[in-house]
Image: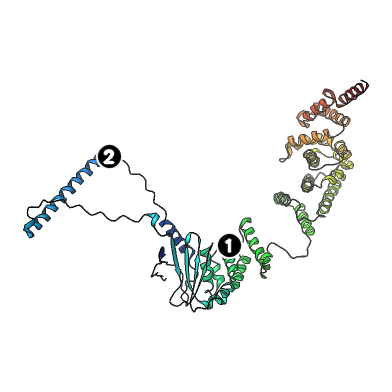
């Protein structure tokens, strides 16, 4: 522990005695002052200029008033007695003034403290030992804050290209360099102190990522290459906590790379791979591992995570032929389901897994706006639809989740299949969905009946009016017999009714044509 005493203060400037809890180097320089001590110094400087706001005094009570009055009387009487005694003594020593009148002596008031507004606003903190140094670096920060460093030319020249250039321009034996508008004086002091450290890595290990990035910025400005390397080694090894911190590190490293700093690659390898393995193969491997997982909870969680990440990515940096991988996985799931249906197997768990896999793959395709081909494939699964009726409800109803997801996607506009595909999809899979609907409502926790009903209704209403009538009349018979066990398509039925009977477009078109003919005749 050591203490720097400032001897002579410049005019209009307050110097602070700085005690920094770190060791002094053999050269006498304060090596890397403690950030806590530096901040305390700044706070003490700021507190000098902040007026203290004391609360207004409370009005005195009657007892306090009487006590104060009594004290004043006592003081007055005691002062008068003292003055009389003093005057008597003066009269005895000076007979000529014997007949003078005794006057009470008034107590002289203390001089008032200097107002806050008149206090000097410039403060100087000094680091180093002026007696052994041959150079001085002055950092002038905002609001006139000044830091003076007593340093050594050889140390600055050996470590900093910036200081080497500046000192080369100085001819005097004792050089004085001033850095104006210093935004981060604290880190400047620490970075200069690192020039005196033999093991910078040990010093940086005590800091956090944010502070090391500040040191890296100053080291870059000073051309302190060994410090830059130590900072990069630290950033390459330390964990980055959170996306915000990672973005700060990457932006700082990329700035160094653009400015020609050549040893940033190890840090960037954490976020940029030089592997020749194409993204398609990696994504395909991830999809395959998720689909073939035997643990239900882990499989469900990873499906949610992968879908979320693909949604955030929104197609960026994803291989264009990634859709081929998804469709290949869809075909594998379909083949597995068809094989189980052909063998009339009632492995409910495996059927449920394959149906869930298909639904998830459809979600991925819908996010990538590439689900139209899947709708064509599913609409043409006539054999699967026929075999569907032969299996027990408890085994087959999972397949109708795929149909429901397609209707929801069409209703939302996530996929836009052709009119023929929409009609074939409704013709092939709507009746099986009606039969499984009650089980879907009670057997699937993630099933949203209102959303599915809205999707079916919107899909029907995209068809020509004759096809709408045919499908809705078929639904009406099922609904009247099945009740809540059948999708409620009343809203779609109302729209079709108004289109057909209340305001038929064909009648308005015909009246418009006849009106045009009559106008032309006139």
Q: Secondary structure at mark 2?
A: loop
The quadrant of the picture occupied by the C terminus is top right
Q: Which picture quadrant has residue 502?
A: top right
User: Taking 2 as reference, is 488 left or right?
Assistant: right
Q: Nearer the viewer, residue 517 or 471?
A: 517
Answer whether residue 21 is visible to the viewer in this image: no
Q: Nearer the viewer, residue 397 or 32?
A: 32
Mark number, residue 66: none
In the displayed structure, would residue 338 be above or below residue 321? above
Q: Which residue is mark 2?
A: 61
Q: Which picture quadrant has residue 343?
A: top right
Where residue 317 appears, as percent x and y from the top left, is 76, 56
Q: Which residue is mark 1?
A: 209
Answer whether residue 459 is visible to the viewer in this image: yes
Where residue 209 appears, as percent x and y from the top left, is 58, 62
Q: Secondary structure at mark 1?
A: helix
User: Taking 508 as reference, is 74 left or right?
Assistant: left
Where residue 179 appears, as percent x and y from the top left, is 53, 67
Q: Earlier in the sequence, mark 2 or mark 1?
A: 2
In the displayed structure, would residue 77 be above or below residue 424? below
User: Residue at 48% across / 70% down in the picture?
Assistant: 149
What is the distance, in whole Å, between disc 2 and disc 1 at their CAs? 59 Å
The quadrant of the picture occupied by the N terminus is bottom left
Q: Nearer the viewer, residue 83 or 199?
A: 83
Are there few (<14), some (14-19), or many (20+) residues within 10 Å of tag 2? Answer: few
Are there few (<14), some (14-19), or many (20+) residues within 10 Å of tag 1? Answer: many
């Amino acid at each position: 522990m050591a203490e720097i005493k400032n001897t002579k203060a410049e005019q209009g400037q307050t110097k602070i005695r700085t005690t920094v809890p770190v060791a002094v180097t053999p050269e006498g320089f304060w090596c890397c002052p403690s950030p806590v001590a530096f901040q305390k110094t700044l706070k003490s400087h700021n507190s000098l200029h902040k007026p203290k706001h004391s609360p207004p005094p409370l009005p005195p009570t009657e007892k306090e008033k009487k006590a104060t009055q009594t004290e004043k009387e006592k003081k007055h009487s005691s002062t008068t007695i003292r003055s009389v005694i003093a005057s008597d003594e003066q009269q005895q020593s000076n007979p000529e003034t014997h007949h003078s009148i005794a006057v009470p002596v008034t107590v002289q008031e203390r001089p008032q403290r200097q107002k806050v507004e008149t206090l000097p606003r410039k403060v100087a903190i000094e680091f180093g030992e002026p007696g052994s140094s041959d150079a001085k670096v002055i950092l002038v920060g905002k609001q006139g804050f000044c830091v003076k460093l007593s340093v050594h030319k050889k140390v600055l020249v050996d470590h900093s290209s910036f200081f080497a250039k500046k000192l080369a321009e100085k001819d005097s034996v004792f050089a004085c360099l001033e850095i104006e508008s210093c935004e981060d004086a604290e880190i400047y002091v620490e970075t200069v102190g690192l020039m005196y450290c033999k093991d910078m890595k040990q010093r940086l290990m005590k800091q956090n990522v944010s502070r090391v990035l500040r040191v890296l910025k100053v080291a870059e400005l000073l051309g302190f290459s060994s410090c830059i390397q130590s900072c990069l080694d630290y950033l390459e090894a330390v964990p980055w906590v959170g996306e915000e911190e990672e973005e700060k590190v990457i932006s700082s490293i990329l700035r160094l790379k653009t400015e020609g700093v050549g040893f940033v690659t190890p840090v960037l390898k954490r976020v940029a791979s030089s592997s020749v393995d194409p993204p398609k193969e990696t994504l395909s491997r991830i999809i395959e591992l998720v689909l073939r997982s035997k643990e239900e909870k882990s499989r469900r969680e990873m499906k949610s995570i992968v879908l979320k990440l693909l949604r955030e990515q929104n197609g960026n940096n994803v291989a264009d032929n990634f859709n081929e991988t998804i469709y290949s996985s869809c075909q594998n799931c379909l083949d597995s389901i068809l094989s189980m249906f052909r063998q009339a197997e009632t492995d409910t768990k495996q059927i449920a897994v394959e149906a869930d896999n298909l639904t998830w793959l459809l979600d991925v395709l819908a996010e990538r706006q590439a689900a139209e081909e899947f709708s064509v494939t599913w609409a043409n699964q006539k054999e699967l639809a026929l075999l569907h009726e032969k299996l027990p409800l408890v085994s087959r109803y999972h397949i109708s989740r795929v149909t429901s997801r397609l209707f929801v996607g069409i209703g939302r506009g996530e996929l836009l299949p052709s009119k023929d595909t929409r009609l074939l999809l409704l013709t092939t899979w709507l009746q099986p969905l009606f039969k499984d609907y009650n089980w879907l409502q009670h057997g699937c926790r993630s099933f949203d009946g209102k959303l599915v009903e809205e999707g079916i209704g919107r899909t029907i209403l995209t068809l020509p009016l004759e096809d709408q009538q045919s499908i809705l009349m078929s639904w009406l018979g099922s609904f009247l017999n099945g009740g809540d066990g059948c999708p409620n398509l009343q809203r779609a039925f109302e729209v079709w009714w108004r289109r057909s009977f209340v305001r038929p477009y064909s009648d308005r078109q015909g009246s418009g044509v006849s009106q045009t003919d009559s106008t032309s005749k006139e």
